[in-house]
Image (cartoon, grey):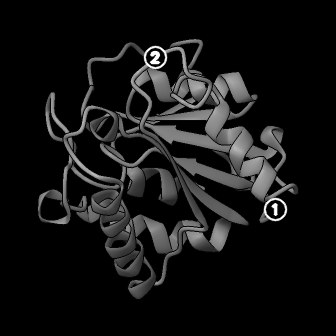
Amino acid sequence: MLNKLHIQQDWTLFLDRDGVINHEKKEDYIRNWTEFEFYKESLLALPILAQKFNKIIITTNQKGIGKGLMSVDDLTLIHQNMTNKIVELGGRIDAIYYCPDLDNASINRKPQPGMAYQAKTTFPEIDFKRSIMVGNRMSDMEFGRNAGMQTVYLATTHPEAPFPDTKIDYRYDNLFQFAQSI
């Protein structure tokens, strides 16, 4: 578990979206707002996390756009509605970065750290050594490592992932368990 003494309010929290904040569609994409379903635990966690972290940033791969299965407008509506609900409940999201690229080698596609670098361009005060990446896939953990962050694995969709693992610093069942631990 993360100790309160190790996290200070100048830290940055990076979150994956699907499988962390909302239910993930198995082998498919959340294509519009009607398909988006929050985890109840994430709605409880985000107001707690808003008090603990200076910045909360979502980084999400969105290959569905690149494949033509959804539009940027669809994604924008999902993110607007998601953020509005989070704010309504006392949480916040400071920025959202997404990668629609189909090429897995794209610098912006997780596990590459491009979206972290985009965030640092927008928020130069971000220190990756004082940042945590929370995700539900090993590519999220690799993204965090590639940017020099600590990593938190949520076993929401892939509980079979081995732990301990060199890519995972901490493991929790859901975002609320993580929030309670700090």
Instruction: Decide which of 149, 35 is in the foreground and name it.
Output: 35
In the picture of the structure, the residue carrying the numbered disc 1 is 10
Q: Which residue sits at x=19%, y=50%?
A: 31
Disc 1: CA contacts within 10 A as few (<14), some (14-19) or many (>=20): some
Question: Distance of mark 1 from mark 2, alpha carbons?
Answer: 32 Å
Q: Earlier in the sequence, mark 1 or mark 2?
A: 1
Dot 2: what SS? loop
Disc 2: CA contacts within 10 A as few (<14), some (14-19) or many (>=20): few
Residue 14 falls left or right of residue 15: right
- Residue 103 is situated, as x and y percent measured from the top left of the image, at 45, 18
Q: Amino acid at mark 1?
A: Asp
Q: Which residue sits at x=46%, y=67%?
A: 46
Mark sitting on residue 116:
none
The reply to whether residue 6 is in sight is no
- Residue 96 is situated, as x and y percent measured from the top left of the image, at 53, 57
- Quadrant assignment for the C terminus: bottom right
- Quadrant assignment for the N terminus: top right
- Residue 81 is situated, as x and y percent measured from the top left of the image, at 32, 75
Mark sitting on residue 104:
2
Establish if 45 lies above or below 148.
below
Write down the quadrant of residue 137 in the picture.
Answer: top left
Q: Amino acid at mark 2?
A: Asn
Dot 1: what SS? loop
